[in-house]
Amino acid sequence: MRAVGYLLLLVGACIMLIGLTSALRELIDLYQQVAADPLGTGVLEEDSGLQQRILIDAALGATGLVPSTVGFVLLRVARARRLRRQQEKTSQL
């Protein structure tokens, strides 16, 4: 159970990292475009789809929260079982 917990935790963290880096990359590109041409009009237009791309990237990162949380819970359950078994062994002696 611990291996599955670690695997889910790792997969969830990777998905969150991918979503975060994708969203930040969009923001960095926006900043570079604005810094290169401060009076440019085409950077922040509604038709560019920047807001939608950032929202999609953030949603992708948020989906990583589910496997990460499940993995964390599995690790806690495995730890509680292990501690309970140790306590039972010591109480039997």
Image (tube, grey):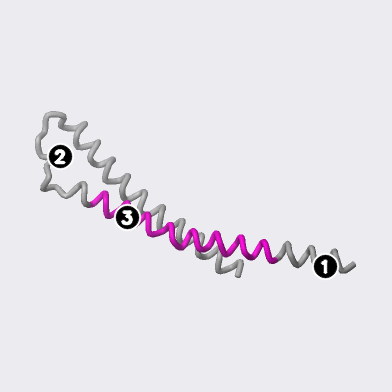
**Residue depicted at x 73% and y 62%:** 83
Give the distance between the C-alpha atoms of the residues marked 1 and 3, in whole angstroms. 46 Å
**Residue depicted at x 32% and y 55%:** 59
Q: Which stretch did the figure color magenta?
A: 53-81
Give the distance between the C-alpha atoms of the residues marked 3 and 2, in whole angstroms. 21 Å
| Residue highlighted by disc 3 | 59
Q: Position of residue 12 (x, y in %)?
A: 45, 59
Please state which amino acid type lies under the numbered disc 2.
Leu
Q: Position of residue 23 (x, y in %)?
A: 31, 48
Is residue 56 shown in magenta?
yes
| Residue highlighted by disc 1 | 89
**Residue depicted at x 50% and y 64%:** 8
- What mark, if any, has residue 31 been given in the picture? none
| Residue highlighted by disc 2 | 44
> Which is in the foreground here, disc 1 or disc 3?
1
Mark 3 crowdedness (10 Å alpha carbons): few <14, some 14-19, many ≥20: some
Mark 1: secondary structure:
helix
Q: For this view, does 51 lie left or right of residue 40? A: right
Q: Position of residue 2 (x, y in %)?
A: 61, 66
Q: Return the disc, 3 or 2, that comes first in the chain's sequence.
A: 2
> Which is in the foreground here, disc 1 or disc 2?
1
Is residue 35 shown in magenta?
no
